[in-house]
Image (tube, rainbow, N blue to C red):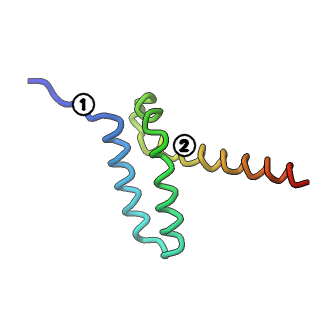
Amino acid sequence: MGHTVSSQRMAADIAISELKAFGRALRLDEKLIFDEMLKKPLKHYGTISYASSIHAWAVLLLSIMLEHEKRIREMEGLKKLLS
């Protein structure tokens, strides 16, 4: 009989659930920031599935970093406009 291979989306959801356990131990102000960070990979589920990495947590963290880098560059661009 065959076996079922879990999708990358399922692996990402499991990794996010595990990371949420870490978030519950944070102080309230940090927890709110952490919860917002965990929403960032949702924009990249298609890319995460395409990567099909066995390390779903690493791709999730890269998605968070990508969103932060985009925000930094956006803020730098605004800074240049203002100067």
Number of residues whose C-alpha sits closer than 10 Å to that of mark 1, classed few (under 14), some (14–19) or many (20 or more): few
Q: Which residue is mark 2?
A: 62
Q: Residue at (66%, 45%) from the top-left corner?
A: 70
Q: Earlier in the sequence, mark 2 or mark 1?
A: 1
Q: Residue at (53%, 70%) from the top-left corner?
A: 30
Number of residues whose C-alpha sits closer than 10 Å to that of mark 2, classed few (under 14), some (14–19) or many (20 or more): some
Q: Is residue 3 above or below residue 9?
A: above
Which residue sits furthest top? 1
Q: Which residue is mark 1?
A: 5
Q: Secondary structure at mark 2?
A: helix
Residue 26 on image: x %, y %: 47, 71
What amino acid is at disc 2?
A: Leu
Q: Is residue 74 above or below residue 4?
A: below
Q: Secondary structure at mark 1?
A: loop
What amino acid is at disc 1?
A: Val
Residue 63 on image: x %, y %: 53, 43
Q: Residue at (74%, 52%) from the top-left corner?
A: 75
Q: Is residue 22 above or below residue 72?
A: below
